[in-house]
Amino acid sequence: MDTASSLAAYWYFHLPNFILAALMYTLLGRALLGLMVDADSPNYIWRFFCRITDPVIAIVTVVTPKAAAPVVLWLFGFVWLFWLRVALHYTLLLLNLAPRFGGAAS
């Protein structure tokens, strides 16, 4: 199975996985950039990172103690999105809907 047919056949796996991965790594980038940039910086890259990740941070804030620093929230968001990706893949594997590698073992 080639890449194009795999993407078309398993879009319900690849699309959410890609979106979650993009959010996850954007949160990590925000945490790293937050060490160098002020929270109210006019930098357009910082504003982009904040605009993309603020909805995820709002959800993480609901289940995280109020005393946590913002960088801790960003890192918790990274971890939560990672486990969400793992749960997605595991669920689709259990339902026999996830893409599998072709090879000698299959």
Image: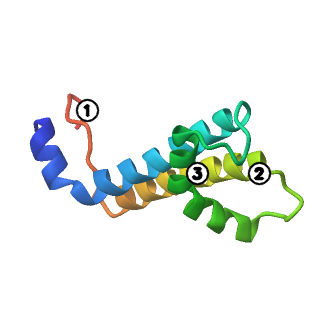
The residue lying at 44 percent from left, 45 percent from top is 22
Query: In the rendered view, how is the structure colored?
Result: rainbow
Asked if residue 70 lies left or right of residue 97, the reply is right
Q: Nearer the viewer, residue 15 or 42?
A: 42
* Residue at left offset 22%, top offset 38%: 106
* 42 relative to 3 in the view: left or right: right
> Which residue was labeled with disc 2?
70
- Lower sequence index among marks 3 and 2: 3
Q: Secondary structure at mark 1?
A: loop
- In this rendering, which labeled residue sits more in front, label 3 or label 2? 3
Which residue sits at x=64%, y=53%? 77
Compared to residue 59, the image places residue 99 above or below, namely above
What x and y, as percent, mark residue 74? 68, 49
Q: Which of the two labelled residues, at mark 1 and mark 3, occupies the earlier sequence position?
A: 3
Alpha carbon separation for disc pair 3 and 2:
12 Å
Q: Earlier in the sequence, mark 2 or mark 1?
A: 2
On residue 50, the disc is 3
Residue placed farthest to the bottom in the image? Answer: 62
- Which residue matches tag 1? 105
Residue 76 appears at what percent x and percent y? 70, 51
Determine which of the numbered discs, if any, sits on residue 2 in the image.
Answer: none
Q: Dividing the picture into quarters, in which one does residue 12 lie?
A: bottom left
Tell me the element at label 2: helix
Amino acid at pointer 2: Pro
Q: Secondary structure at mark 3?
A: helix
Residue furthest front as drawn: 42
Label 2 packing within 10 angstroms: few (<14), some (14-19), many (20+): some
3 and 2 marks in contact (CB < 8 Å): no
| Amino acid at circle 3 | Cys
Q: Quick one: label 1, few (<14), some, or many (20+) residues within 10 Å?
A: few
Whole-percent x, y for residue 73 in the image: 73, 53
Check disc 1 and give the amino acid type: Ala
